[in-house]
């Protein structure tokens, strides 16, 4: 499995190209902006897109999705709980995402998103949004956490559909249940591991955590 991170848009959201080295099939996770740059990265590596996967509906994670889908004809996938907001996004900071985006596939807990001989498992991790998801590569010790979990942080919960208690439950019960060596690739910022966050994250520790402001649009 090859993972390419592109920081896109004015706030540097992480877009990931996740590829099978053997087959050249890839997923595009959270194409938030700069579609030409994302497409150039795909072409330079001769990757064929099997699906575009959105961890949640916020504009900084979906802004280039339509252009990538149009160019590659790949299906657009999002957690079932965020599908309606993707089609009719509420305003965030006075901004809305692209109107009329419609998911081809609504993802649920335990679904597999396949590319080549590989697949990522869908984990429902609501709290930052009502239908947020994370994607786990079992056997590869990788997690794409969207805006659920960051290095020493969590997603903000003061936007539509957000809930601090729900987000903390998602992290404790779904993400912290993964092996400690799992590398977390978040929607913003640098990578971390599950073990590091279990020990060091001030917002969600295994034995309780203070409520606090998170990050991520």
Image: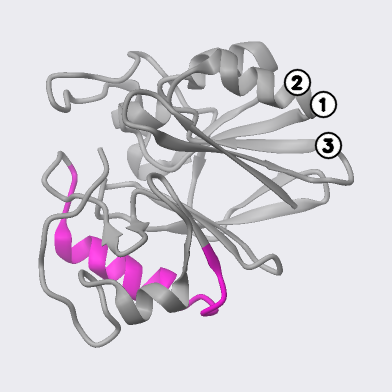
Q: Position of residue 201 (x, y in %)?
A: 28, 72
What residue is disc 2 on? 43
Mark 1 lies on a secondary structure that is loop
Question: Any magenta on residue 166?
Answer: yes
Mark 3 lies on a secondary structure that is loop
What residue is disc 3 on? 24
Question: Any magenta on residue 167?
Answer: yes
Per the rendered image, the range of residues in magenta is: 161-183
What residue is disc 1 on? 46
| Alpha carbon separation for disc pair 3 and 1 | 7 Å
Residue at the image point whose x is 45% and y is 78% from the top:
195
Residue at the image point whose x is 63% and y is 68% from the top:
141
Q: Are marks 3 and 1 in contact (CB under 8 Å)?
A: yes
| Alpha carbon separation for disc pair 3 and 2 | 11 Å
Q: Are marks 1 and 2 in contact (CB under 8 Å)?
A: yes
Residue at the image point whose x is 12% and y is 19% from the top:
94
Mark 2 lies on a secondary structure that is helix
Residue 73 appears in the picture as rendered: no
- First in sequence: mark 3 or mark 2? 3
């Amino acid at each position: 499995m090859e993972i390419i991170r592109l920081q896109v848009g004015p706030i540097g959201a992480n877009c990931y190209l996740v590829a099978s080295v053997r087959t050249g099939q890839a997923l595009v996770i959270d194409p938030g902006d700069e579609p030409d740059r994302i497409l150039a990265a795909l072409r330079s590596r001769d990757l064929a897109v099997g699906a575009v996967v959105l961890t949640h509906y916020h504009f900084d994670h979906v802004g280039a999705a339509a252009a990538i889908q149009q160019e590659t004809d790949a299906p657009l996938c999002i957690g079932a709980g965020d599908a309606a907001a993707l089609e009719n996004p509420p305003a965030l900071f006075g901004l809305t995402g692209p109107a009329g985006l419609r998911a081809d596939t609504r993802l649920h807990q335990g679904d597999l998103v396949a590319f080549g001989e590989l697949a990522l498992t869908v984990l429902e991790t609501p709290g930052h949004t009502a239908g947020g998801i994370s994607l786990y590569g079992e056997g590869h010790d990788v997690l794409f956490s969207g805006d659920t979990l960051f290095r020493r942080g969590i997603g903000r919960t003061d936007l539509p559909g957000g809930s601090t208690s729900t987000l903390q439950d998602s992290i404790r019960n779904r993400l912290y249940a993964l092996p400690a060596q799992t590398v977390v690739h978040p929607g913003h910022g640098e990578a971390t591991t599950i073990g590091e966050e279990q020990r060091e994250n001030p917002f969600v520790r295994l034995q309780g955590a203070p409520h606090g402001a998170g990050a991520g649009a």
